[in-house]
Amino acid sequence: MIFASISGIATAGEYAPLDCNKARSPAEQTICDSYALGQSEARMATLFAVATSLVAMGQRGDIQDAQREWLAARDACGKNTACLAVAYGRRIGALEKVIATIASRGPY
């Protein structure tokens, strides 16, 4: 399974799926133990990478700030799988909206 973590100043690498052998927080450990949450983590990380690659620096910073806030909220769920699932659903929806907004401005 995979997970994301945050420490100090966030970088794009911190949002990428990482080795679950390094999972530290209860939320990260729970994500690594759940196939469904691991899949949500992978989807969220992919959407985050796509969204941040398609926008200008200013908007990229806004998306990264929102990601840091989301990671803190996700970690506050601890081992509560229902809370984690809701957190992922909301973040995935927000990232999909960013990408849909970009796509609606086409053609490219």
Image (cartoon, rainbow, N blue to C red):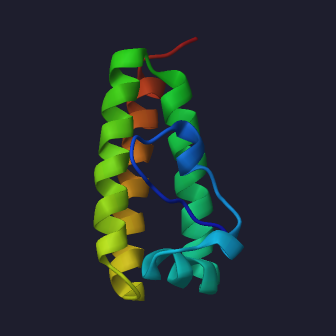
State the image coordinates of residue 59 (x, y, percent, origin top left).
Answer: 34, 23
Q: Residue at x 39, y 37 (%)?
A: 64
Is residue 1 at all visible to an observer of this figure?
no
Asked if residue 24 lies left or right of residue 64, the reply is right
User: Could you say which quadrant of the image residue 92 lies in?
Assistant: bottom left
User: Could you say which quadrant of the image residue 23 lies in?
Assistant: bottom right
Front residue of this view, candidates 45 and 6? 6
Number of marks: 0
Q: Residue at x 32, y 78 (%)?
A: 77
Quadrant containing the C terminus is top right
Front residue of this view, candidates 12 and 42? 12
User: Could you say which quadrant of the image residue 98 lies in?
Assistant: top left
Asked if residue 6 lies left or right of residue 29, the reply is left
State the image coordinates of residue 90 (x, y, percent, origin top left).
Answer: 33, 61
Residue closest to the far front: 8
Front residue of this view, candidates 42 and 11? 11
Q: Residue at x 39, y 76 (%)?
A: 84
Front residue of this view, candidates 104 and 41? 41
Compared with residue 15, is residue 33 higher up or lower down, i.e. above or below?
A: below
Compared with residue 75, is residue 16 higher up or lower down, i.e. above or below?
A: above
State the image coordinates of residue 70 (x, y, percent, origin top left).
Answer: 32, 56
Asked if residue 76 lies left or right of residue 29, the reply is left
Is residue 12 at all visible to an observer of this figure?
yes
Compared with residue 64, is residue 32 higher up or lower down, i.e. above or below?
A: below
Residue closest to the far top: 108
State the image coordinates of residue 86 (x, y, percent, origin top left).
Answer: 34, 73
Quadrant containing the N terminus is bottom right
Q: Residue at x 54, y 49 (%)?
A: 15
